[in-house]
Amino acid sequence: MLPSLPPSTATDLAIDQLAGTQVTDAGDHLVVRSPGRPGYHWGNFLQVTGGDVDDAHRWVRRFEAAFPGARHLAVGLPREPEPAAWETLGLTGDVVESLTAERAPRSTDLPAGYHVAPLADEADWGQRVAAERAENEATGEFPPAEYAEFLRGQCAARRRLVDAGHGHWVGAWTAQGELAASMGIVVLDARGATRRLARYQSVLTHPDHRRRGLARHLLAVAAQWAADRGAAQWVIVADDGSDAGRLYRAAGFTPGPREYGYHAASWR
């Protein structure tokens, strides 16, 4: 773990390092690289740790020097900047909130017509990838072809974490075998701490199955898996002001620091 960073960034990097991501300390920033995965934008980025967060031109130059062939741009910041400094360069701001819980979320009833099971085989993971592609097509956030390439690498990395015993991916399935909702969780050893923590990963519910309590039920299922492996703290991340964040608060998570970053999916 990287304890000097905010919870979201620290746990993101710790998980990515388990999957092969490299982190280099460059003094006032970290250079984060994921070899073989150039389409993983937040696996190939600059994380600012000191200096002027409003000096967008400087950090863009640092990114371009570190990633001369990148088609994207991504810079994480340690505190809130002046948005105009970044937006005038054509970058989009990301604000996320880290939430934590000191005990596993209370279990809730599984809605009728569904059953819970881990993602186990090629077909299961294929449904998860298809759901993420559909979500991106609905939002238009990333170029479809590049995002499909990213998802292939991401799926392979997640499956390696599962195979190594670090992580668990669980879904709620319909009687017809359709994946209605899913999420992951990874257990991490916190440096200098006597207890382990668990970080949730990519909560996603199909639009046809939302607002039925599936994600809330899976939060408890995933938390119990982590608790059985020694986790005593749970971390989850949501977009600032989102419905997801409100769901997590209702499940017993305490809101923590906001984290800031700027990103462009197509930079060159």
Image: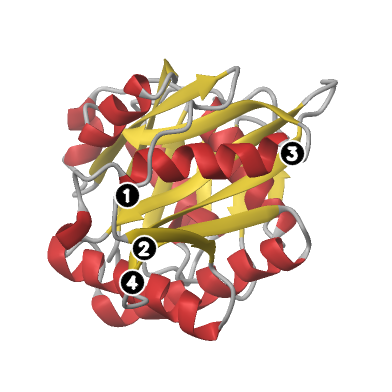
Q: CA distance from mark 1 to mark 4?
A: 40 Å
Query: Which of the marked residues, 1 or 2, is nearer the chain's N terminus?
Result: 2
Query: Which of the marked residues, 4 or 3, is nearer the chain's N terminus?
Result: 4
Q: Are the two marked residues, 4 and 2, in contact with CB atoms closer than 8 angstroms?
A: no
Counting from the top left corner in percent of width and height, residue 228 is at 74, 38
Which residue in the protein does label 1 denote? Answer: 263
Closest to the camera, between mark 1 and mark 4, is 4
Image quadrant containing the N terminus:
top right
Closest to the camera, between mark 4 and mark 2, is 4
Q: CA distance from mark 4 to mark 3?
A: 28 Å
Q: Amino acid at mark 2?
A: His
How many residues crowd mark 4 within 10 Å: few (<14), some (14–19), many (20+)?
few
Query: Which of the marked residues, 4 or 2, is nearer the chain's N terminus?
Result: 2
| Residue 198, picture quadrant | top right
How many residues crowd mark 3 within 10 Å: few (<14), some (14–19), many (20+)?
few
Image quadrant containing the C terminus:
bottom left
Q: CA distance from mark 2 to mark 3?
A: 39 Å
Which residue in the protein does label 4 denote? Answer: 175
How many residues crowd mark 2 within 10 Å: few (<14), some (14–19), many (20+)?
many
Looking at the rendered structure, which numbered label has been put on residue 228? 3
Asked if 11 appears above or below 91 in the picture, the reply is above
Q: Amino acid at mark 4?
A: Ala
Q: Residue at position x 29%, y 60% from top?
A: 113
Q: Are the two marked residues, 1 and 2, in contact with CB atoms closer than 8 angstroms?
A: yes
Q: Residue at position x 30%, y 82% from top?
A: 145
Nearest the eye: 218 or 78: 218
Nearest the eye: 133 or 222: 222
Which residue in the protein does label 2 denote? Answer: 72
